[in-house]
Amino acid sequence: QVQLVESGGGVVQAGRSLRLSCAASGFTFSTHGMHWVRQAPGKGLEWLAVIWYDGSYKYYADSVKGRFTISRDSSKNTLYLQMNSLRAEDTAVYYCAREPDFWSGQRGYLDYWGQGTLVTVSS
Amino acid sequence: QTVVTQEPSFSVSPGGTVTLTCGLTSGSVSSSYYPSWYQQTPGQAPRTLIYNTNTRSSGVPDRFSGSILGNKAALTITGAQADDESDYYCALYMGSGINVFGVGTKVTVL
């Protein structure tokens, strides 16, 4: 079955960096685009970034552009989010999520989600 | 900047029907945005309910349905049950993998 397991969260000081990982299993990782979505305490979902199935394209929300970098290692079936220059407002649960198989022709939604990892940025 | 609108909250009686909407502050929502809907209970990860406007994800009960109503996407819960009490988020697809979420609607069943 499809599993997405995030790790790497924790408490970090403002201005520092953190790298999140998302270990994928139960599907062919290399044919799915992957996303990061976050949720600040008591707030709604915020889409952050996508990386295409082959890593050829990456897109970011304006709120993290230039500070966060999404990447993937298909040999390890793992998605990453490198977060630099962290701010208090980056405090959130970070979810990785999968989109449908690129070759299925389905677009525009996230079909599986991980359980999330909490990042707390102290000021 | 694209802002996706949703009602802050709704209350529905058990067995009742409620329709949540998903709009844009500028422009209309159409099927070209591939509207999707996600359900989230406190402390849990989101669950995908509806995609491509009106297609239910695997295992989603048929009391959940999606549509376009006027210039908005809509999620209708028909015959609401107690465990439908959740936050509901819509998302619109902007192309190239980019999604924008709405602010969410809190649904109370009482």
Image (cartoon, rainbow, N blue to C red):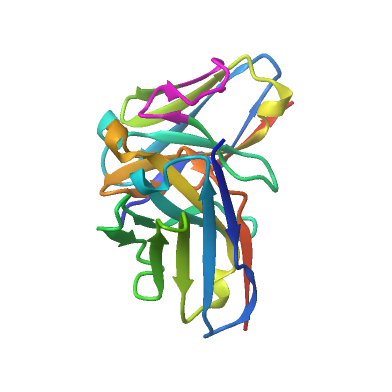
Q: Image height check: is A73 above or below B52? A: below
Could you say where residue B57 lies in the image, as x and y percent from the top left? 48, 26
Report the span colored magenta: B50-65
Main SS, magenta region, reads: loop
Q: Report the side of A102 relative to A97 (left or right).
A: left
Say which quadrant the N terminus of chain A sits in.
Answer: top right
Q: Image height check: is A19 above or below A40? A: below
Could you say where residue B90 lies in the image, as x and y percent from the top left? 45, 39
Could you say where residue A69 lies in the image, as x and y percent from the top left? 39, 69
Picture quarter containing residue A18? bottom right
Say which quadrant the C terminus of chain A sits in.
Answer: bottom right
Which residue appears at 52% of the width and 37% of the height?
A: B38
In the rendered image, residue B53 lying in the magenta stretch gets the answer yes
Outermost residue on the front side: it is A75
Number of marks drawn: 0
Near-viewer residue (B35 or A115): A115
Could you say where residue B27 lies in the image, as x and y percent from the top left? 26, 41
**Residue B102 seen from this side:** no
Q: Report the side of B56 relative to B81 (left or right).
A: left
Picture quarter containing residue B82? top right
Which residue appears at 35% of the width and 70% of the height?
A: A65
In the rendered image, residue B86 lying in the magenta stretch gets the answer no
**Residue B36 seen from this side:** yes
Q: Image height check: is B29 above or below A9? A: above
Which residue appears at 42% of the width and 58% of the height?
A: A75
